[in-house]
Image (cartoon, helix red, strand yellow):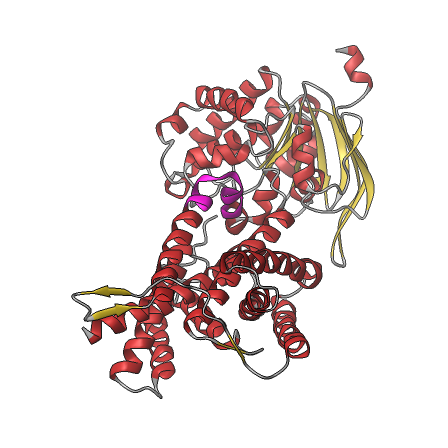
């Protein structure tokens, strides 16, 4: 553990992202070490999703660097980043509505071999028995919770070593939120490092090792999740008490 | 018997529309653009097949293959040079570019092959089919056209539903960003779509000129517009929609010309389109737009 602490698995340095003239991310730097759960919390529009989308390659940074496992991946393009073992499960699930559950999972393993996919599929069905039951069903007919599970399962099919989850609990009933967080912790136990973006700061901080607070495109606070959970400023701004 | 004969001819013409419509609908579904130069690729394909057969003395099947290969490359080149740089541009800019590309192809053809129409040689040497004791005669070209269309439909459906590239196309069509997150190379997928569409356009050009053997630089325009209509009729973006829309359009056109008015044949086709769109704005098989958060 101490050795891996030396070099972060993911190192984002001074990231600058623009949407046209709008300066959305103003010099964000963050690290994720192997075996951690790191969470990025902040209000609506703070730039959490933009940060994840940029790391995943959907957006091009104006400047700054993204280094994953020693390899510079900044501005590489999403399709070239996934094979490196870094995968984003996007906000709003974005499962392929017109494809079956099985096809969605197959697409998740697009950049892997057939043998790897067979193994990953067995693993995923073990974690999400509900998806196994619905294998032949079209994804658009699944409930919101099932679609979130499918989105996570699809991301797992690419066998990520670092999984980024963007608002996995959005729009779900409290009982499903608990279930999703249980799954996140289970994934973490089986060796997947996790970078989690959440508006549900209470839940996110309670499962995370470390956290960053993002405000209007800048990181304003960071530290062990436990500490932030009891920090007065954080409590007032994000935990509502 | 005359009705049956008209019906068969309608299905044959409709098969050609369907092949062209597939190119429109796949490009629309996957690249989210209307490639108005598609009709002119048909014309280029027909000219190339003509040259290969007439000037270079190649056998018909080889001529067709030459045209298919050349149009595949042409389609990918057009996409790479004209449309790919506009990926982030407004759809209007892409549309204007496509129209410009259409004129460019027509005028290049004018420059290379001249304005005088060429008579397309009879390359399909299949004997006519005599049915019902010789009462119904179906020309060889018609038989080949319908058969080719069936083969194309089956192969394309299998390709889209079963192969990795086909599934990747469906992903890109549904959600480009999510497709990229799967590791799908969107640019290559779009390029492949243009390749398939243009290859089918070459087949359509060959078959069109085998049935209607007059070839000039504007040969592709009208069938192109009709096929676009067929794609919208069936529901643009939908592959089965393009197939059904194309065949229905061909049948309506031929029957309209035979039984209503020869002059008004095209008017009837577009009138039917307007009625269908009034009742079903997304076309026959088009999926209504859904927004789900």
Asked if residue B108 is positioned above or below residue A97 in the image, the reply reads: below
**In the image, residue A210 lies at what x, y percent?**
70, 24
Task: Classify residue B31 by image quadrant.
Answer: bottom right
Rendered residue at 62%/76% (across/down):
B106
**In the image, residue A215 lies at what x, y percent?**
72, 42
Rendered residue at 36%/31% (across/down):
A134
Is any part of residue B88 visible from this angle?
A: no
Q: Is residue B25 inside the magenta stretch?
A: no
**In the image, residue B249 lies at what x, y percent?**
35, 70
The region drawn magenta spans B158-170
Foreground pick, B242 / A164 = B242
Please indicate whether residue A31 sits to the left or right of residue B108 in the image: right
Foreground pick, A48 / B195 = B195
Asked if residue B247 is positioned above or below residue A58 in the image, the reply reads: below
Give the prevailing secondary structure in the magenta stretch: helix
Image quarter of the C terminus of chain A: top right
Image quarter of the N terminus of chain A: top right
Number of marks in the image? Answer: 0
Residue at the front extreme of this rendering: B57
Foreground pick, A50 / B245 = B245
Rendered residue at 41%/61% (across/down):
B242
Rendered residue at 27%/73% (across/down):
B6
Q: Is residue B161 inside the magenta stretch?
A: yes
Is any part of residue B162 visible from this angle?
A: yes
Foreground pick, B54 / B201 = B54
**In the image, residue A11 lies at what x, y percent?**
78, 30
Asked if residue B99 is positioned above or below residue B165 in the image, the reply reads: below
Task: Classify residue A56 by image quadrant.
Answer: top right
Please indicate whether residue A76 sits to the left or right of residue A150 in the image: right
């Amino acid at each position: 553990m101490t050795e891996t602490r030396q070099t972060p698995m993911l190192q984002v340095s001074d990231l600058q992202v623009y949407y046209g003239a709008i300066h959305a991310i103003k010099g964000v730097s963050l690290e994720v070490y192997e075996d951690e759960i790191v969470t990025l919390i902040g209000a609506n529009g703070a730039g959490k999703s933009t940060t994840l989308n940029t790391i995943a390659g959907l957006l091009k940074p104006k400047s700054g660097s993204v280094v994953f496992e020693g390899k510079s991946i900044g501005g590489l393009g999403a399709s070239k980043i996934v094979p490196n073992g870094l995968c984003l499960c996007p906000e709003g699930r974005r499962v392929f509505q017109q494809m079956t559950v099985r096809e969605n999972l197959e697409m998740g393993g697009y950049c892997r071999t057939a043998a790897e996919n067979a193994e990953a599929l067995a693993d995923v069905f073990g974690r999400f028995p509900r998806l196994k039951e619905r294998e032949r069903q079209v994804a658009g007919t699944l409930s919101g919770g099932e679609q979130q599970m499918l989105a996570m399962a699809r991301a797992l099919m690419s066998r990520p070593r670092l999984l980024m989850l963007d608002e996995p609990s959005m729009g779900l009933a409290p009982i499903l939120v608990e279930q999703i967080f249980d799954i996140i912790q289970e994934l973490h136990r089986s060796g997947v490092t996790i970078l989690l973006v959440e508006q549900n700061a209470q839940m996110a901080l309670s499962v995370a090792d470390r956290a960053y607070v993002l405000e209007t495109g800048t990181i304003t606070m960071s530290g062990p999740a436990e500490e932030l959970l009891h920090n007065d400023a954080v409590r007032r701004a994000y935990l509502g008490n | 018997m005359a009705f049956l004969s008209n019906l068969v001819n309608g299905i044959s013409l409709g098969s050609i529309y369907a092949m062209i419509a597939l190119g429109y609908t796949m490009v629309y579904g996957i690249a989210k653009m209307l490639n108005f130069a598609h009709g002119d690729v048909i014309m280029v394909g027909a000219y190339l097949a003509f040259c290969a057969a007439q000037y270079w003395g190649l056998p018909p099947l080889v001529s067709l293959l030459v045209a298919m290969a050349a149009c595949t490359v042409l389609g990918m080149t057009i996409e790479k040079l004209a449309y790919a740089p506009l990926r982030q541009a407004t759809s209007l800019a892409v549309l204007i570019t496509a129209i410009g590309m259409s004129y460019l192809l027509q005028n290049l053809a004018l420059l290379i092959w001249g304005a005088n129409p060429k008579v397309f040689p009879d390359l399909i040497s299949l004997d006519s089919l005599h049915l019902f004791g010789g009462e119904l005669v179906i020309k060889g070209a018609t038989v080949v056209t319908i058969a080719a269309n069936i083969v194309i439909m089956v192969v394309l459906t299998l390709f889209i539903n079963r192969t990795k590239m086909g599934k990747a196309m469906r992903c890109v069509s549904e959600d480009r960003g999510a497709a990229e997150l799967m590791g799908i190379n969107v640019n290559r997928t779009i390029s492949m779509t243009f390749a398939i569409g243009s290859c089918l356009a070459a087949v359509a050009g060959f078959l069109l000129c085998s049935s209607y053997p007059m070839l000039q630089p504007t040969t592709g325009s009208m069938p192109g517009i009709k096929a676009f209509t067929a794609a919208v009729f069936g529901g643009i973006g939908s592959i089965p929609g393009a197939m059904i829309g194309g065949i229905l359009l061909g049948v309506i056109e031929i029957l309209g010309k035979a039984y209503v008015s020869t002059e008004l044949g095209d008017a009837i086709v577009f009138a039917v389109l307007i009625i269908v769109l009034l009742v079903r704005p997304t076309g026959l098989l088009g999926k209504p737009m859904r927004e789900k958060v």
